[in-house]
Amino acid sequence: MPEKSLDVVAIGNAIVDVLARSDQAFLDAHGMVKGSMQLVDQDVSEAIYADMGPGTETSGGSAANTAAGLASFHSRVAFIGKVRDDQLGQVFAHDIRSIGVEFDVPPATTGPTTARCLVLVTSDAQRTMSTYLGASSLIGPDDVDADLVARAKVVFCEGYLWDMPDAKAALVKGMDVAAASGGKVAFSLSDSFCVERHRDEFLGLVEEKIDILFANQAEICSLYQTESWDEAAAHVSNHVEIACLTRSEHGSTIATADGERVEVPAQMLRRVVDTTGAGDLYAAGFLHGLTHDRPLPVCGRLAALAAAEVISHVGARPQVTLAGLESSRL
Amino acid sequence: MPEKSLDVVAIGNAIVDVLARSDQAFLDAHGMVKGSMQLVDQDVSEAIYADMGPGTETSGGSAANTAAGLASFHSRVAFIGKVRDDQLGQVFAHDIRSIGVEFDVPPATTGPTTARCLVLVTSDAQRTMSTYLGASSLIGPDDVDADLVARAKVVFCEGYLWDMPDAKAALVKGMDVAAASGGKVAFSLSDSFCVERHRDEFLGLVEEKIDILFANQAEICSLYQTESWDEAAAHVSNHVEIACLTRSEHGSTIATADGERVEVPAQMLRRVVDTTGAGDLYAAGFLHGLTHDRPLPVCGRLAALAAAEVISHVGARPQVTLAGLESSRL
């Protein structure tokens, strides 16, 4: 990895999560698919909120959670995303800064409110998300500070941003600046429905711009329209330098363009409480290791460690210092 | 208890809690006394917030937590308190309504923001609170719907409201309407510093207006300016019908004007995580029992049950349905 003053810049949606316990009947009544993320408009978001139980507000957003995880590992990290200048926007900015992430994108002063994701956690620890993107969807290329991105070893982009044209342009700018300045481009496929919406463009990104890809089983199989995980894994390693393919409790496989395959077991847990943030924190652990020149099997173990921490409690960001876990466990 | 369409109306501050883990060094640096509640202005609140770690926003407020606990026991309950028409005000209103509490006080449309309490939880499970009252301090007699109060068997008032003249007038109106309509007046001394600020007036309330008093050891000893709990307990039972005197892990004593004394053991817990809301939920359990004509020892056991639930997790409101706990445990 080159000498840079930042390890990672993450670009993604700036979202406040509203977490509440729920059940299958509620999901059915609102036509939600368990385990998925659906984009909703403000009216639908408010209708679901009015119907759901008491919530807990915590900062979220996929790449933002990854940034928080990296800071918790004491990596040097910045986040690029857009909030409104409202109370939830202040909450988001406070939380991400207070954990040590650089966050300097000015909030929007007009337009929709800060993004909100209603996260319904069922008793099987699955989370089902309805996201109102609000101000987050206003992110554009001007919000991507080229100097900041050029300072980072890795730019980490969340696929969810691909849903809005300006946000897409922001991601492309981040990727291109990283490539031009000797940085690596990491990308998360985010969600299988997101892959379905943008399959052709995501295939193009994988072939042309992405160095490090994060995907779970449903996402990588959707990308290559196959039911065979092995087939999908073989495809992707023809295109990216490193593919991190996660399979929940079955662990993950790190496949490289050189043909290396590292199998990483999942950490055993007494109880999985809430899977929100598992993929985001997996990426944090992996990128922390990678940007600190650790061997791939160690990167994988750090990824599994961070994912295990975040699914052992409610909420999508670590509740302990991951740097502490790292030194005590690895 | 008379025939009424509501069991309890609670009057108190409408607050959103911002919970974060902290340590003694942080409390020292900000001159905070561990375990206490201090009132702060907006500037101090913002300075502490800027310095503290990532938080979790949840609805709070002492009497509001009691109302939420009562609803969780399936008591019929309403809450009177004031928020602003901002995002945190919407969060407060959503949460308390969604658990089944009637809450119809219109939000303020101008003036300070919804009240916020910064709750710092240390590793010994103690909580230290800095409260910016904001819109909550705007509550006045007009917000107390006399018809609503007259419908309730008990009006439950939090002592914290005594800090503002209009809020005090609102409490007095609530107490007087309850007394005139055959309801009982319950009151929480809230905090030993609050008792110090208002000792003479609180002594007057105890002698003239309060039927049911809730106090912990520090509060009741401060009220009677004695270090002897026995002496304080003897004093108070000369004045109120029922005094519920709590002593953390040592349980509580219910002392009546008839000279009855019921000793209630605290529930044994494997681990105390966060004591925020212990007193509020104790009051919820007790008032649920009392308004359902249960004998005092059962009321005490319900109080201990609700307090134990809320200190077994982070946050000041129950995470399970207390009615379910009641039927499985008692």
Image (spheres, coloured by chain):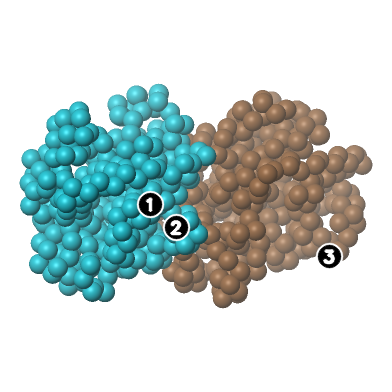
Chain colours: A cyan, B brown
Q: Label 2: which residue?
A: A330
Residue at image point 68% right, 49% down = B279
Q: Chain of mark 2?
A: A
Q: Label 1: which residue?
A: A301
Spot occupied by residue A248 in the image (x, y as percentages of width and height): 35, 38
Above or below, A218 against B27 in this view is above
Q: Amino acid at mark 3?
A: Gln
Residue A71 placement, left or right of A188: right
In depth, the one of B180 and B291 nearer the eye is B291
Q: Are marks 3 and 1 on the same chain?
A: no
Residue at image point 67% right, 29% down = B326
Disc 1 packing (10 Å; few <14; some 14–19; many ≥20): many
Residue at image point 62% right, 36% down = B70
Residues at marks 3 and 2, CA–CA distance in whole angstroms: 56 Å
Secondary structure at badge 1 equals helix
Above or below, B98 against B273 in this view is above
Closer to the observer: label 3 or label 2?
Answer: 2
Residues at marks 3 and 1, CA–CA distance in whole angstroms: 59 Å
Q: Are marks 3 and 1 in contact (CB under 8 Å)?
A: no
In depth, the one of B32 and B67 nearer the eye is B32
> In which quarter of the view is residue B127 placed?
bottom right
Disc 3 packing (10 Å; few <14; some 14–19; many ≥20): some
Q: Are marks 1 and 2 on the same chain?
A: yes
Q: Are marks 1 and 2 in contact (CB under 8 Å)?
A: yes
Q: Chain of mark 3?
A: B
Dot 1 or dot 2: first in sequence order is 1
Q: Amino acid at mark 1?
A: Arg
Q: Label 3: which residue?
A: B225
Closer to the observer: label 3 or label 1?
Answer: 1
Spot occupied by residue B297 in the image (x, y as percentages of width and height): 81, 34
